[in-house]
Image (cartoon, helix red, strand yellow):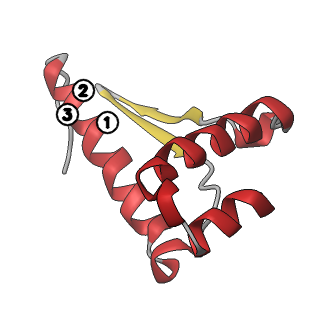
Amino acid sequence: MKKLFQKILNPGVDETRLDDYSLKFVEWLHDSFKESNTAWKEPQVQLTDIQRSAMQFSVRFYVDNIQLEHWRSGNRIQNEVRREMVRRLRQAYIYTLG
């Protein structure tokens, strides 16, 4: 990490290779630091209510760095997940509200 930081600060003749150095760094992170599999980080979909021909679900998912985008990443991701769920339900000819 220190070597990459030094290259970024003063790339010299290696300026065109900065992307290669960055990719090697990310690969090193991936290989050297495995993220633990924790159940609470897994998405959860629960059926919460059934009435006549309607079903209600609760959807929960983990956002890893909520502080990104000035605390707006959670709302943005929630909207993206909602849009994708509605798109897939409509694609399967399942009527949705909203």
Q: Residue under circle 3?
A: 87
Q: Position of residue 9 (x, y in %)?
A: 60, 75
Q: Are marks 1 and 3 in contact (CB under 8 Å)?
A: yes
Residue situated in front as seen by the camera: 22 or 33 = 22
**Which type of secondary structure does the marked residue at label 3 adopt?**
helix
Residue toward you, 83 or 19: 19
Q: Residue at x 20, y 45 (%)?
A: 97
Give how far apart the Cα atoms at labels 1 and 3 are.
5 Å
The residue at which mark 1 appears reads as: 85
Q: Quadrant of the N terminus?
A: bottom right
Determine the secondary structure under disc 2.
helix
Residue type pointed to by label 1 = Met
Q: Residue at x 31, y 36 (%)?
A: 85
* Vertical side of 35 occupied by 77: above or below: below
Q: Secondary structure at mark 1?
A: helix
Q: Marks 2 and 3: CB-CB under 8 Å?
A: yes
Crowding around mark 2 (Cα neighbors within 10 Å: few <14, some 14 to 19, many 20+) is: few
Q: Quadrant of residue 65?
A: bottom right
In this rendered view, identify the residue nearer to me: 45 or 51: 45
What crowding class fits label 1: few (fewer than 14 Cα within 10 Å), some (14-19), or many (20 or more)?
A: few
Residue at point 57%, 49% (across, down): 22
Residue 72 sits above or below residue 52 on the image: below
What amino acid is found at the position of numbered circle 2 in the picture? Arg
Q: Mark 2 to mark 3: distance in Å?
A: 4 Å
Rounded to the nearest whole Å, what is the CA distance between mark 2 and mark 1? 5 Å
- In the image, which disc is placed on residue 76? none
Image location of residue 5, percent across then percent down: 68, 66
Name which residue lies at 58% across and 73% down.
10
Q: How many marks?
A: 3
Q: Is residue 9 left or right of residue 81?
A: right
Residue at the outermost bottom position: 70
